[in-house]
Image (tube, helix red, strand yellow):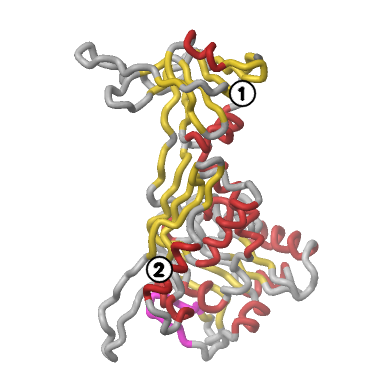
Amino acid sequence: MTEERVPRRDFLKVTAGTALTFGAGLPATAQTSASAPPSPPFSTAQPAEFILKNAKVITVDANFSIAQAIAIAGERIVAVGEDAAMAAHAAPATRIIDLKGKSVIPGLIDGHAHMDREGLKSVYPSLGPVRSIQDIQDRIADLAHKTKPGEWIVTMPIGDPPYYFNVPEILAEKRWPTRQDLDAAAPNNPVFIRSIWGFWRHTLPLVSCANTEALQRAGITRDTVSPADVLTIEKDANGDPTGVFIEREMQPIAELIWFRQAAGFTRADRVRAMPMSTAAYHAFGTTSVFEEHGVANELLRAYKDAYRDGSLTMRSALVLSPNWNAVGGVPLSHRRHRKQSSGRCARDGVAIHRLGGVQLRFLPATPQGQGGSAAARGQ
């Protein structure tokens, strides 16, 4: 057997399936009280792949007792108890990890995660710490040099992640870049600078910017009328669009209507981003997610793809939000059967990915008497 120290990130990756994590600063105040008898140690005869010893294992059992050590094999906990008791599970290849008093807790479950979005933030390039229109132009020009003429250049929002506060005030010009500004940086490419997703910071407005070529491809002219009163197509003194879209809405309407294809995510993007998303959540001790808000078919496919290629290390329960228009008049019973038959994926007997339901949201009838679900409207 070997005794070693393991980096926290590597440990979290290994323990994701066993639903536990550890931290240095957690108090040990959850010790079993004198009036509550300690829980008996838990053990099986199985040899361990690794043992965590000299720890404060917060069991969250009936007595909230604290153990010294824990032994793990694959994705199963095989023993919890005193350091000495772990010897029965130590094989020649077992890794012994001395936590030097650190705490081990059950993994956290995020009940409304939107986990996939963390990795997707890396799909489109950042503009960096820009502080002027010239900085933005320099960054766009650099991207244009690496992009074929005619291909889209789509970037993350202007400002400092993750919240992108105080824009355009942080820019020397105190204004948003216009289509002419972006044309000068990338005359041979359509350019679109995305707005934030409103729920990132819960403040408005959302602002996106496009150059002339992008406006032309979107069919936006001086005669284009905003489809919603919360979306302003900014226009100059001559009545021509400036390329700036200002929205008092938490979801970016301009992107979803006019730039959806350019700023969307491919199936490969979603699968490639999944390990980055899970790593970001594991870093905070999350080992399970429940996406109760509903996931669309393209996200469900990404989860399944990541599971098949072994990159899904997060236990995931998903509520499906179907495109009801796509299923037409198929009876609900048939849809339910399809959902159930496509559902559970397990590894070593542990459910890593499963469907946890179907989302139904009913809206009030419209003046024309038409109701419907938000899923059917593409939300």
Would you place residue 229 above or below residue 40 in this image?
Answer: below
**144 or 237: which is nearer to us?**
144
Q: Secondary structure at mark 1?
A: loop
**Where, quadrant-wise, is the N terminus in this rendering?**
top right
Disc 2 is placed on an element classified as helix
Q: Magenta includes 229?
A: yes
Residue at 51%, 42% (x, y): give it: 349
Q: Which residue does the image show at 37% across and 25% down from the upper left? A: 59
In the figure, 324 relative to 201: above or below?
below
Which residue reaches farthest top? 84
Residue 232 in magenta stretch: yes
Q: Position of residue 243 (x, y in %)?
A: 57, 75
Label ID, residue 336: 2
At 63% from the left and 64% from the top, the residue drawn is 267
Sequence-wise, which precedes: disc 1 or disc 2?
A: 1
For the magenta stretch, what is the residue range?
A: 225-234
| Left or right of residue 66, residue 270 in this image | right
Q: Where is residue 268, by image quadrant? A: bottom right
Q: Is residue 36 left or right of residue 230?
A: left
Q: Nearer the viewer, residue 232 or 194?
A: 194
Image: 240 above or below 98: below
Kind of residue indicated by mark 2: Arg
Q: What residue is shown with label 1?
A: 6
Amino acid under label 1?
A: Val
What is the spatial separation of the Cα atoms under label 1 and label 2, in whole angstroms?
Answer: 45 Å
- Picture coordinates of residue 212, whole percent (x, y): 65, 79
Type of secondary structure dominating the magenta stretch: loop
Which of these two is toward me, 264 or 55? 55
Residue 202 visible at all: no
Give percent across and percent down for residue 72.
53, 26
The residue at the far left in this view is 35
